[in-house]
Amino acid sequence: MKTFFKFLLFVCISCYLISCNSDMDNSEESNAYRFYSIMWKLDDGDGLEVLDYKTHEVFYNNENKDINIVFESMEEVEDYSYFHETENAELLKKLLGKDSIVSIPSEYNYLFSDYSSFSGTEAPLRIGEKVKLHPLMAAASVTRLPPNCKLTQDRTVYQDKITATYSIRFVSKKDWFDYKEIQGKWTGVFFRDIEENPVVEEIGVE
C-alpha cells in the first residue's frame, strides 16, 4: 500500500512540474518574439458575398407646411472585422500579448491567390471576437414632404462580406531569421451602397 501511495505522489509531482515547465515555455516564447507583419490571400472557402437589408417606412404630414424627412444609414447594419478561432489560437494570443492594430482587406478586388500586404483600413487583431468598425462610407438623404401628403420609403442597404486567409509572422527579438508564422481565416463586412425609392402621395383632408 505504501508503495502505491509513493507511486501516486510521484505521478502528481511529475504532472505539476510538466505543467509548470509548459507555462514557463509559453511565457518565454511570447517574450522572445514580436509581431512583424500580416499578409492576405484568397484560399479555399474564401470569397465575396453581397448582403442586402431592406426596410419599408411610411410617414404622414398632417400639418399645413412642408417638413423634411431625414434618412441615415440604418443603425442595425454595421461594419465589423472578425478573426476566426484557429488551432493555434492560444499560441497566437500569447505571442500577441495585447491588441495589435493591423491593416485589413476592405476591398475584395485587391485580394489574390498569393499573399500580399494591405494598407488603409485598420482593425484590432482579436482572435474569436467580432470588432465593430466605423463605416467606410456614410449615407444620408433628405426628402421634402408637402402638407397633407404621405411618404413611402423603401430602402436597400448593400454590404460586402469578405472572407480571406491571413498569415501572421512573428520575428525573434534576438535573431532576425528566427520566425514563426500562423495562418487563419478572417471575415470582414463593409457598407458599400444604398438604394432609396421614395414615393410621395396626397392624402385626403377631412
Image: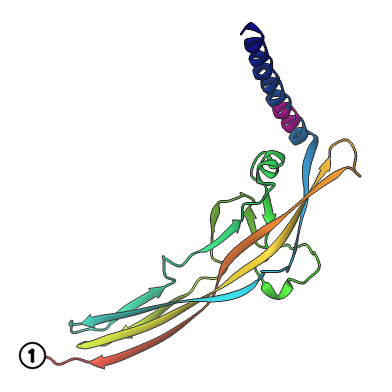
Specify the farthest residue to the left.
206
Left/right placement of residue 112 relative to residue 97 reads: right
Element under disc 1? loop
Question: Residue at coordinates 85% horizontally, 45% vertically from top-left?
Answer: 179
Q: Quadrant of residue 66?
A: bottom left
Q: Quadrant of residue 143?
A: bottom left
**Residue 129 pos. (x, y %):** 55, 51
Q: Main secondary structure of the magenta part?
A: helix
Quarter that holds the N terminus = top right
Which residue matches tag 1? 206
| Residue furthest top in the image | 2
> Residue at position x 72%, y 59% from top?
166
Quarter of the image containing the C terminus? Answer: bottom left
* Image height of 124 relative to 200, above or below: above
Residue 185: x %, y % from top left: 66, 59
Q: Is residue 201 magenta?
A: no
Q: Residue at x 48, y 74 (%)?
A: 139
Q: Position of residue 193 (x, y in %)?
A: 53, 78
Characterize the local packing of mark 1: few (<14), some (14-19) or many (20 or more) Cα atoms within 10 angstroms.
few
The vertical placement of 103 against 195, above or below, is above
At horizontal 73% and vertical 25% (from top left) the residue drawn is 21
Dot 1 amino acid type: Glu
Q: Bounds of the magenta span?
A: 22-27
20 to the left or right of 202: right
Please tell me which residue lies in front, 184 or 68.
184
